Image: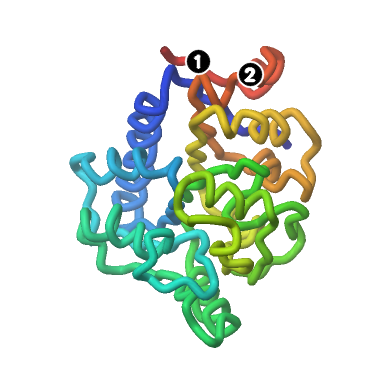
Amino acid sequence: MEIVIFRIFEDKTALSQAAAKQAAAAIRQAIHDRGGARIIAATGTSQLEFLDVLTKTPGIDWPRVELFHLDEYIGLPITHPASFRKILMEQLIEKTGITNHHLIDGDTADPERVVRDIGAQLASAPIDVAFVGIGENGHIAFNDPPADFETEDPYLIVNLDEACRRQQVGEGWFADISKVPARAISMSPRQILKAAEIVAIVPEKRKAQAVKACFEGEISPLLPASILRRHANTLVYLDEDSGSLLNPATRSAFAGNHVT
C-alpha cells in the first residue's frame, strides 16, 4: 500500500503556508466532529516556519486541542535551546494558549517511567493529525536506522546514531557532537501511523537524499520514514530543494501536485 501524496512548492515559505492550511483544516474538522482535536507536533529547524504560520492561522479553537510531541533528548534540561519541550512551549503552546499538553520530560532519572506514563496518555484515544519531519538520515521522530517497525509501544527509548547527532550540530543546536545526547525518548513508527492524518513537512536541500531514498527505495527499517508509505492518509510537503532528486515517475506514481 503506497498512498502517500507529494505536494511540491517553489520554496520553504510557500510549503509552510500550504502545510499550515492543511493542518488547520484537520484541527478544525476534528473539533467540529468530536468537540476536540488530538494532535502530535514535531520540532526542529525544518518545522519552525510551519509552526509560526500555523499559530497565526485564524479560526482554530486552541483550548479544544490536546497536544503530544514526538521526541525529546534524555538528559537535556528544558532550559537548553535544543530542548524540544522548550521549543514547543515557545513556538506553539505560549502562542496559542493550548493548556492540554503532554510534554516528554527527558531530564529525569527514570525515563522508563516517563515512557510508560506518556504512552498511556497517548494511547487513551485516537490521534487526529500528526505533524512530522524527516531527518537527513531518513529518521522519523528520533527513530534512526534501523528503526523498530514492529513494536506497538507508543514511545521508546532509542539510541541516536552519529548521522542524527551530526545533523543537530549542523543545525546549530550544539557546539560539537560530544554535546549532543546519545539517547532520546521517541514516539514509535507504528504509533505515528495510528494518526488519522499525517502531514510531513520536509523542506531544504539537505533532506533531498533522504526523501529520494525513503520514497524511491524499499520500505525498510533502514529508511525509517519510508514507513509513511504504509499510511492511507499522508501528505508530504516538499520544496524544490528537498524534492530535487525525485524522478518524474515517482512524482506521478504518488499522484503529487507541483505548485509554484
Specify the amino acid type for callout 2.
Answer: Arg
Left or right: 9 in relation to 158: left
Q: Quadrant of residue 10?
A: top left
Left or right: 110 in relation to 147: left
Decide which of 172, 74 is in the foreground and name it: 172
The answer to which of marks 1 and 2 sits earlier in the sequence is 2
Residue drawn at 64 percent across, 69 percent down: 156
Q: Quadrant of residue 40?
A: bottom left
Q: State which quarter of the image contains the C terminus.
A: top left
Residue drawn at 66 percent across, 20 percent down: 246
Residue 120 lies, with reference to residue 139, above or below; the image says below
Residue drawn at 69 percent across, 54 percent down: 162
Mark on residue 258? 1
Q: Is residue 52 visible?
A: yes
Q: What percent of the width, then of the height, locates residue 4?
A: 61, 33
Q: Secondary structure at mark 2?
A: helix
Q: What percent of the width, then of the height, locates residue 15?
A: 41, 28
User: Mark 1: few, some, or many residues within 10 Å (few <14, many ≥20)?
Assistant: some
Mark on residue 202? none
Q: What percent of the width, then of the height, locates residue 20?
A: 35, 37
Q: How is the image coloured?
A: rainbow
Residue 204 lies, with reference to residue 192, above or below; the image says above
**Residue denoted by label 2:** 251
Residue drawn at 34 percent across, 38 percent down: 49
Left or right: 88 in relation to 193: left
Q: Quadrant of residue 5?
A: top right
